[in-house]
Amino acid sequence: MRKSMSLPPLPLPDNPYGAVFGRASQTPQSAPVQLLPGYPLHPGPSAISSSETSGGPQYAAPKQPACQVCCGSPAAEVALRYHQGLGLFMLFRKQKGRLCRICGTAVFRELTARTLWQGWWQPLSAVLFNPITIILNLLVRLRINDLHEPGYDLVGTRLDPGKPVLLRPAAFVALLVAAFVLYIAGALVMG
């Protein structure tokens, strides 16, 4: 006859989330914590000090900022600009916020296309403010490009980037203005 072997029951782990119903809030120090290398552990009641573990300093995943439009992560705090020359007047607009890569690209393309179309219609705008606005937007675009893709759109509010700036009709207005300025400059140089 075969003798059956019974194994001792496995011990249940402590509650890693803190309080047990009906008792005061307790945080067990023996609860397993999933740790990642390279990120500092957020301070809190369940933080494990580096002296309690044999592996040196411990790290946990950081909180990443989320996009204000679609709640995608990661996001960056950016400020995109729009400039409009209005004959005798000028209009300066700035849109600030936390945007993910896709929403930031959409806002960049929209505001830069408006600037390329409407920013040249005042002499000081054409010479100074419109080129500065375009350069500042391009610098922000570099920062947006450094972000990872935000993943699936859970909320359904993600902006559509649309066509690239140079494929939009507004870019042709900027090319016409640039050609006209070069023509005038060439005519003045030639006499």
Image: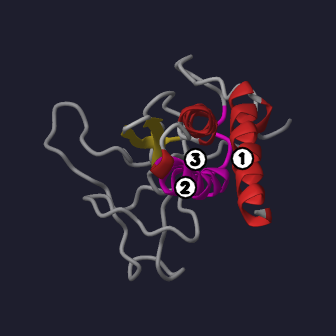
Query: Which residue is at a point 60% across and 50% down the rendered structure image?
Result: 144
- Please tell me whether residue 27 is drawn above or below residue 152 in the rendered image: below
Residue at the left extreme, as displayed: 24
- Residue 74 on image: x %, y %: 55, 46
* Residue annotated with mark 3: 8
Look at the numbered disc 2 and give the secondary structure of its residue.
helix
- Please tell me whether residue 6 is drawn above or below residue 71 in the rendered image: below
Query: Which residue is at a point 37% across and 38% down the rendered structure image?
Result: 88
Residue at the right extreme, as displayed: 1
Q: Amino acid at mark 2?
A: Val
**In this rendering, the label closer to the viewer, 3 or 1:** 1
Q: Is 147 in front, or is 20?
A: 147
- Please tell me whether residue 87 is drawn above or below residue 74 in the rendered image: above
- Residue 157 on image: x %, y %: 53, 19
Q: Quadrant of residue 131?
A: bottom right
Q: Is 1 in front, or is 180?
A: 180
Mark 3, residues whose alpha carbon is within 10 Å: few (<14), some, or many (≥20)? few
Mark 1, residues whose alpha carbon is within 10 Å: few (<14), some, or many (≥20)? some
Query: Which residue is at a point 54% across and 32% down the rendered structure image?
Result: 118
Q: Earlier in the sequence, mark 3 or mark 1?
A: 3
Residue at the top extreme, as displayed: 156
- Residue 78 on image: x %, y %: 46, 50
Q: Is residue 162 left or right of residue 32?
A: right
The span picked out in magenta is: 125-151
Q: Is residue 136 left or right of residue 45?
A: right
Q: Amino acid at mark 1?
A: Ala
* Residue annotated with mark 2: 127
Mark 2, residues whose alpha carbon is within 10 Å: few (<14), some, or many (≥20)? few
Tell me, for residue 87, which label it has, or none: none
* Residue annotated with mark 1: 178
Q: Quadrant of residue 68?
A: top left
The quadrant of the picture occupied by the N terminus is top right
